Image (cartoon, helix red, strand yellow):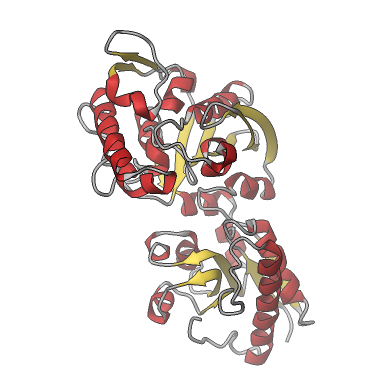
Amino acid sequence: MSGISVLVAPDKFKGSLTAREVADSLRTGLMGAGENLHCTQLPLADGGDGSVEAAVAAGFERVPLVVTGPTGEPVATSIAFDGHTGVLEVASISGLSVLPGGKLRPLHATSFGVGEAIRFAVEHLNAKRVVVALGGSATTDGGAGMLHALDARFLDHSGTAVSPAPNVLADLREVTLDLEPLAGVELVGASDVTNPLLGVSGTATVFGPQKGATPEDVARLETALTHFRRLTDPRNQYAEISGAGSAGGLGFAILLLQGRLVSGADFFLDLLDFDAHAATADLIITGEGSLDEQTERGKLVSVVARRSKGKTVIAVAGRSVLSTAAAAGMGLASTFTLTDRSRVDTSHDPQLSAQLLREIGLEIAGDIAAAGPSGFPAARPSR
């Protein structure tokens, strides 16, 4: 068998491997079969952590900086920049992964550092477009912290200027936005979350518990965000837009600044020129840590399958609860999971995850060889 072109285009396996490491491991397995395969790697992102890394892998320059973390401590992060567009990620600025000691602070965590990073991209890099990857947030402040860093003013009922942490939003009397820091700049929020700001599907109710909020905290946050919405969006133009509730309401704040929200998966596939890579591939291997009901609602694997235009697509995942019918309905020829190969939890074991991915790559190469030139790989049930 000769001349088969394989595109390896996975997302990260969260808690275990970066997208680059997943791609490297699969490629090592594929090439170990001795078949004449041409393997191209394209690590992907969907707007969560790993978005900066994916942009750097695509040729952007990594620019380090230090900003304010979610509880006020300095945090080292980076922006990917190509001379025009700056890409930053909330996860490495105000995310769960940078909370001191991992201690959750649902009523106090702030997005102030995100605003600082945006400002750095505009004022120091002269970015004309700033992309905020919205996944992985530790905050539920409606983006108030980010707005504060971009010169918004927050006054309490006594007329005193305050820093707008979630626990003080309900006590605000007035919020004054300032669009001047972003004059002439396109602001984009990239996320795979479609939740609105408020309500049973809103950011506090759905994501607050993941950030440490008790039922009482969730109710308090909902009240605070409702008041914040009344002050900043009195005609309710933005709070119900799909994605306004992403990253604890950062999506809402981006809309207040006249920015736009986009599908993280589609945006980063465009940014990384996925369509051009897919057009020259015979087989596409994608994947992410978990395949579940969210996958069908615009997560990266489903978007890759949709945009592969009839090419054979194989998914690799840490775990999968998708039925065979659901996987086939998304356009997946087959699915390989790490949980089928190990009784040990691989989600926090990089070495074992990499080893199993190499084994999967080798098996896929064997399937290609067995199928022959007329049709590879033989479609089989998801597993």
Q: Is residue 293 left or right of residue 120?
A: left
Q: Is residue 60 positioned above or below 147 on the image?
A: below
- Percent across and percent down for residue 47 are 50, 48
Q: Residue 116's x, y, as percent? A: 54, 25
Is residue 382 placed above or below 285 in the rendered structure? below
Numbered circles on residues, count: 0
Q: Percent x, y for residue 311?
A: 53, 74
Name the residue nearer the viewer: 147 or 318.
318
Is residue 183 visible in the rendered image? The answer is no
State which quadrant residue 285 falls in.
Answer: bottom right
The answer to which of 248 and 309 lies nearer the viewer is 248
Residue 302 located left or right of residue 225: right
Q: Relative to the observer, which residue lies in front, 219 or 236? A: 219
Task: Say which residue appears at 56% left-offset and 88% top-offset.
Answer: 378
Kindly identify the residue that appears in the image at 37 percent across and 42 percent down.
213
Q: Quadrant of residue 141?
A: top left
Residue that sits furthest to the left in the current view = 235
Q: Is residue 371 left or right of residue 90?
A: right
In this view, the residue in front, 5 or 33, is 33
Quadrant of the snapshot with the N terminus: bottom right
Q: Is residue 383 visible?
A: yes
Q: Residue at x 45, y 40 (%)?
A: 189
Q: Position of residue 29 (x, y in %)?
A: 73, 75
- What's the residue at 48%, 85% (across, down)? 381
| 64 vs 91: above or below | above
